[in-house]
Amino acid sequence: MSIAQPAATAPTAEHEHGYPIGHDLHPLDRLSRWVSNHRRFVLIGWMLLVLIMAPLALTLNGALSGAGWDASGSISSEVRSELQTSFPDLGAEAAYVVFHQGAVITENPAALSGVFASLQSAPASTVMVDPLTQPAEAGLISPDGRTALIPMKLDGATDADLPESAGELISYVNGLDLPDGVRAEVTGQWPMWSDFNKTNEEALHRAELLSGLPSVILLFLAFGSLIAAGLPLMLAIAGIAFGFGALHIIGAAIPLSVWSMNFSMMIGLAVGIDYSLFIVSRYREERYQGKSPNDAMGVTLSTAGFAVLLSALSVVLSLAAVFIVPVMVFRAMALGMILSVSAVAVAALTLLPVILLLMGDRILESKQQHKSDEGRERLWSRWTGLALRRPGISLAAGLILLFALILPAFGMRLGMPDARVVDEGRSSRDGYEMLVSAFGEGAAAPLFITVDSSEADQTVTSAQLNSTTLDASIVTGPSSADRVVVRVVSTEGADSAKTMALVADLRTDLSAVAPSAKVGGPAAQSHDLTQVLTDRAPYAILIIMAGAFLLLLLVFRSLVIALVSVILDLISVAAAFGFATLVFQHGYGAGLIGIEPQGFVNAWAPLFFFALLFGLSMDYQLFLLAAIRERYEQHGDTKLAVREGIARTGRPITNAALIMIVVFIAFGVTGPIPPTELGVTLAFAVFLDATVVRMLLVPTIMGMLGEKNWWLPKWLDKRLPVIQFSH
């Protein structure tokens, strides 16, 4: 196979290592020069870094937990702390062994007594009470008398230890020799997180397998070379290894959520492949134009590399806005993704150039493949020309589609998942279903109200007056502070709208009759999480939009481009919200991805959708606009620059979008509902962004605006630094 050789050019005066003399170097061109001069140092440095981080990355799951869902400073957080310190024997966060048999337990207690006796030897846990010795009002035996709950106190110095203890208890109970017709499962908050962690880890392995082969095939089709196709995956894996290792180290100092692992892997792999693809594509293009490897790399990093740097910065800044939400699990998720994106961006700007330079001409395509690429560029140019000739139709078609998708978002309902987030067949999920079937939906997540003893009776009476209350009773004696706990069981599940309303109503009603009362428990925790997300999300969204606007204004020196880009990104994200509402709230197409609709969108999802989609949208926007700006600076014709810019970036953007969609879908369809919700929605959003927005609306609007695209007030023009995308 013959390789397409670079065109010959006249020799120019060069520095010792092949860089032209007599021009100022772009900062990333300087980086390219340094990397080229220190290839061995960079390569060995990355190899050592990956070797050091790999063991930490592979054992990351054990360093993470399901903890961190408390909204700092919330009432439910205060109640949880009080329950742990003043009422440890209540078992508000105990694991429950759910026992069921066909006969009435009190008439035939032998099987339950046998299980209770066996649990005395259970690892990492302690039996709290025998349900056979408790009065009926204790609520440990179901109304039909066939199901019993055995509360188990889990061993653990911190919350991070409890899922592991729950896992040991689950394994022990699963190994019990039970009589025919008897079932025993373990459920509760920490058993659910134990099962979720295992499901999560298995899902990650499946996602890696499911996304790996299609990504390699797409990369091979994009580059026409297995060697070139392997580079983006290798770079992404190196960056993720560093990100995971760093997350492990941080997790040893502060508690981090297991959710950070899924999302950081998904985003790191997707953007890592994207960034590598953009750089490799531009490097090959510069080589075909006759530049030496060093010169080609300098141009590549000062153009495509600069766009990659800005894109990574945009994603990081967008995710950083999540830190204004005072919930550890959300901060951990954002931190994990920030580490992965930062690591793959650094790898793309340092390790990838070294490998490309070492490979020489082996990275280039055959002559036939290169001609095919040029033919595809002409196709993109013709497509853009069509959109520019019919701007009114193109603009209307794109906006009508996006606004049609936005409409369902106005009916979005937010909620927090329960144990059904775990697949059937897991002990915590099966135990949960047994519990709610026998005791009612509200029994799985009761409300706990801590209150002064003198106001306890008023608290019970007030709770009983609410139509959503199934039961309300005092369940502890007075603490040293003369406070007691009132347990309130809802008629509905913890994630239902009625239970959320019950939390708010109780807080309002009790403020008048029992001012010392504090309403907590799982449902109150979900209520407070949703409330803090609703309260803080607008500020985070404003920060993200302002950051994107300022970045675009600084880079492209145009108020029009910055404003139009932010508006288009906003419309695109809103369309993704509508899609998520249709699928995950109303269930349209849910069966195709193997999930049951929850009847709501996870409360945390909109904020992460917005942060990620805004950051990822900037990825393609920056790459496209950088190419357009570069061409505009060469000849000053906006419409021609639009056609040339899209012709140059159409193929890499499409390839990058396809690979990103494959990665997101793979992580979506193999995991529990939360990663599925994020992965599938991101995949759809990327599809919309790379087609309707970048290849239809952006060229149409820029063509219609013409030279107005580059408008900037003179007073601002004098104050903004000049940033060039050309070498």
Image (cartoon, rainbow, N blue to C red):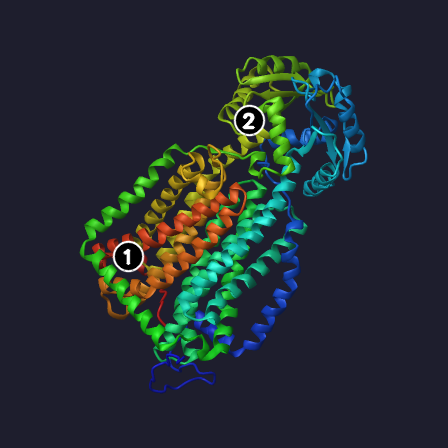
Give the CA distance from mark 1 to mark 2: 55 Å
Report the side of 55 relative to 133 (left or right): left
Report the side of 350 relative to 445 (left or right): left
Front residue of 430/716: it is 430
Picture quarter with the C terminus:
bottom left
Instruction: Give whichever of discs 1 and 2 has the lower sequence position.
Output: 2
Q: How many numbered marks does the figure carry?
A: 2
Picture quarter with the N terminus:
bottom left
Give the amino acid at mark 2. Gly
x 46%, y 32%: residue: 599
In which image quadrant can residue 53 be found?
bottom right
| Label ID, residue 493 | 2
Front residue of 68/192: it is 192
Pinpoint residue 38: horizontal percent, then vertical percent.
Answer: 54, 77
Pinpoint residue 190: horizontal percent, then vertical percent.
Answer: 66, 37
Report the side of 488 relative to 505 (left or right): right
**Residue 115 visible, this angle:** yes
Give the amino acid at mark 1. Leu
**Residue 520 visible, this angle:** no
| Label ID, residue 712 | 1
Pointer 1 with pointer 2, Cβ within 8 A:
no
Pinpoint residue 535: horizontal percent, then vertical percent.
Answer: 47, 35
Q: Secondary structure at mark 1?
A: loop
x 56%, y 35%: residue: 420
Q: Secondary structure at mark 2?
A: loop
Mark 1: few/some/many CA within 10 Å (<14, 14-19, 20+): some
x 64%, y 21%: residue: 487
Front residue of 24/374: it is 374
